[in-house]
Structures are given as structure tokens and as C-alpha cells.
Image (tube, rainbow, N blue to C red):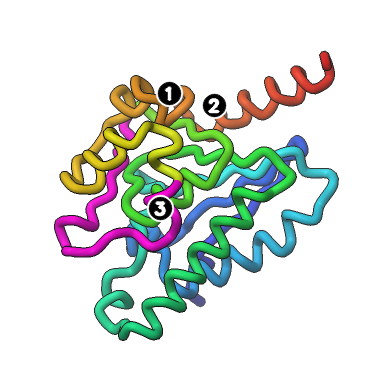
Amino acid sequence: MNAPSLLVEVADNAAVVRFNKAAQRNSLSVSTLDELNNSLNALLPRDDLNAIIFTGTGDVFASGADISELTRLDPSSALEFSKLGQSIFQRIADAKQLTIAAINGYCMGGALDLALSCDIRVASRNAVMSHPGAMRGIITGWGGTQRLPRIVGRSRAIEMFVTASRIDSSSALSFGLIREIGDPVVDCALSVVRGAATNRLQI
């Protein structure tokens, strides 16, 4: 049997959604996006969850859209594919739970758009982030062009888009793309969740 594209675990009032197609570099194919949407259908209404953490497997958080699928798109299907990703990532942005991207490794293209839709981003020391679309003559259609400038500033965002440069964790921390660096990165994210819960109790 084929392994699921996502694994979901719930512990200590937090859900960990893990991309689980390491052989495909955790690409955000249509089937993976559908699984992600179904997982959100189950998780977002839950009042017992304080946080949802997104992470990957091996040395990959996720690698964006499946290139083989992109090459088959015509203008109409490309628009629908763009709307699908935008809709799902907006659901993450609008979640009542705290959402955290625990970036464990390579986080490329549409995967960075997903991370940008989260409230908080933390990363492992070996994480790498990039919007590489310019090298292929395309640009992301999943909301990153709007969210990235709000987080890192217009000039930095334009530089990342047009140069397709890879950003390591230290650089990402220095200009506010991520909140902190920690390994194991999911433990780092869970620490943020516990801190947020404590701060709410103090209020």
C-alpha cells in the first residue's frame, strides 16, 4: 500500500501535521493538497487543540508544487491549481489555533508559501528556504507574493523572488523570516506552544 502523504499526531493539545513523501521531496502535489485540506477539515473545528504544527521528513520540509503536474497545466487548470493552494493556505492563516511551521530542512517555493501562512516559523540549523520560481520563468501563485513582503519587507522579498537565492536559518532569523532556530525543530515548536499557553494564562 502507498504511504499517506501526511501523518497527523496529536499530543498535549497540539497537532503535528508531517509531510511524509520523502522520496518525492514532500512535493505539494494535488493529492497532497487534498490530504492537507481533509486534515484541516478534521483539525480546525477542534476546541481541544491549541496549536497546529506543520513539519516534514528527513531533510525536507516540503518542496512546493509537483513540477510534473505543473508542466501539464493549461491556463484554466493553472488558475484552478492556484486557487486551490490559496484557499488551503488561507484556511491555515485564518485558523483559530496557533499555527507554526517547524521547518526541518529544505522549504522551497509553495512550501515557503505554506510556512508564510502560519503565525510563527521556527527552523532547524540546517534549514534552507527559497522561492526558486524565477529560475523556471514562473512565480508562486499561492499567496507568497503578498505575505513575504509583509514579513521581511518589500526590498528583501523582491530580492528573494528575482534572484531565487537560498536563505539559511541564520539569515532567515536575522531579517525576521523565522522566529528562532532549534533542534529538534518540532520540540522547538512545542516549546513555543507551551510559552504561548503560559502567556495566555498570565493574562
The quadrant holding residue 151 is top left
- 144 inside magenta stretch: yes
Q: Which residue is mark 3?
A: 111
- Name which of mark 2 and mark 1 comes first in the sequence: 1
Q: Amino acid at mark 2?
A: Cys
Closest to the observer, 81 or 24: 81
| Residue behind mark 2 | 188
Q: Residue at x 49, y 74 (%)?
A: 31
Helix, strand or loop status at disc 2: helix
Examine the rendered structure and indicate whether residue 125 appears above or below residue 115: above
Q: Nearer the viewer, residue 31 or 116?
A: 116
Residues rendered magenta in the picture: 126-146
Q: Report the residue marked by disc 1.
A: 181
Contact, mark 2 vs mark 1 (Cβ under 8 Å): yes
Which numbered circle lies on residue 139? none
The three-letter amino acid code for the residue at tag 3 is: Ala
The magenta stretch spans residue 136? yes
Q: Position of residue 121 (x, y in %)?
A: 49, 34
Q: Residue at x 68, y 46 (%)?
A: 15
Q: Quadrant of residue 106?
A: top left
For marks 3 and 2, the one nearer the N-term is 3
Residue lying farthest to the top in this orientation: 202
Alpha carbon separation for disc pair 3 and 2:
19 Å
State how far apart marks 2 and 1 are (Cα). Answer: 8 Å
- Residue type at mark 1: give it: Ile
Q: Name the element at disc 3.
A: helix
